[in-house]
Image: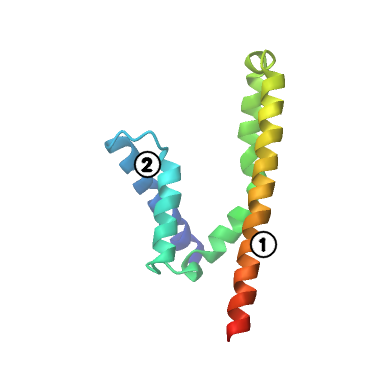
Amino acid sequence: MKIFREAIIILGIYLIGEIISRVLSLPVPGNILGMIILLLLLCTKVIKTEQIETTTNFLLDHLAFFFIPAGVGLMTSFGIIKDTWFKLIIVCVITTIIIIASTGLMVQFISRRIKKEQGEK
């Protein structure tokens, strides 16, 4: 019953995001709005992580499974992609470098801040 309740919470927030996106005709997909709503609810402690922990751990453990439809979609769109493959590779390499660099800088910033706070205590 706990897993069912957790799934209902997550799917309910997703549904709210979809409704907001459609009703307001926003250019942001409903699933993204749902994730933002979930983040806000978690940050404000309206929803505690323990309330959705089992289901979220299950989804994270099986995350690779969710990339299969995207991969199949790419395979069916090969005719479109083959004309621009070089540009796509360049964009993928550049964005990967940017993401790795920004993640590294953020981790360094946070670790320095944590060490500084621990040193003050």
Residue drawn at x 71%, y 27% is: 89
Looking at the image, is mark 1 or mark 2 nearer the viewer?
1
Quarter where residue 18 is shown: top left
Residue drawn at x 34%, y 48% is: 16
Residue drawn at x 65%, y 60% is: 107
Q: Mark 1 points at which residue?
A: 108
Task: Give amino acid for label 2.
Answer: Glu
* Earlier residue among tags 1 and 2: 2
Q: Which of 52 and 79 is in front in this view?
A: 79
Q: Can residue 116 be seen in this view?
A: yes
Residue 3 in the image, given as x and y percentages of width and height: 51, 62
Q: What element carries label 2?
A: helix
Residue 9 in the image, given as x and y percentages of width and height: 41, 58
What sort of colour scheme is used for the picture?
rainbow
Against 32, is 94 above or below? above
Residue 38 in the image, given as x and y percentages of width and height: 43, 56
Task: Give amino acid for label 1.
Answer: Gln
Q: Is mark 1 on a helix, strand or loop?
A: helix
Q: Is residue 18 left or right of residue 92?
A: left
- Give me the C-alpha separation between circle 1 and circle 2: 36 Å
Residue, far bottom: 121
Against 37, is 68 above or below? above
Q: Nearer the viewer, residue 98 or 17?
A: 98
Residue 91 in the image, given as x and y percentages of width and height: 66, 29
Q: Mark 2 points at which residue?
A: 18
Where is the C terminus found, in terms of image quarters?
Answer: bottom right
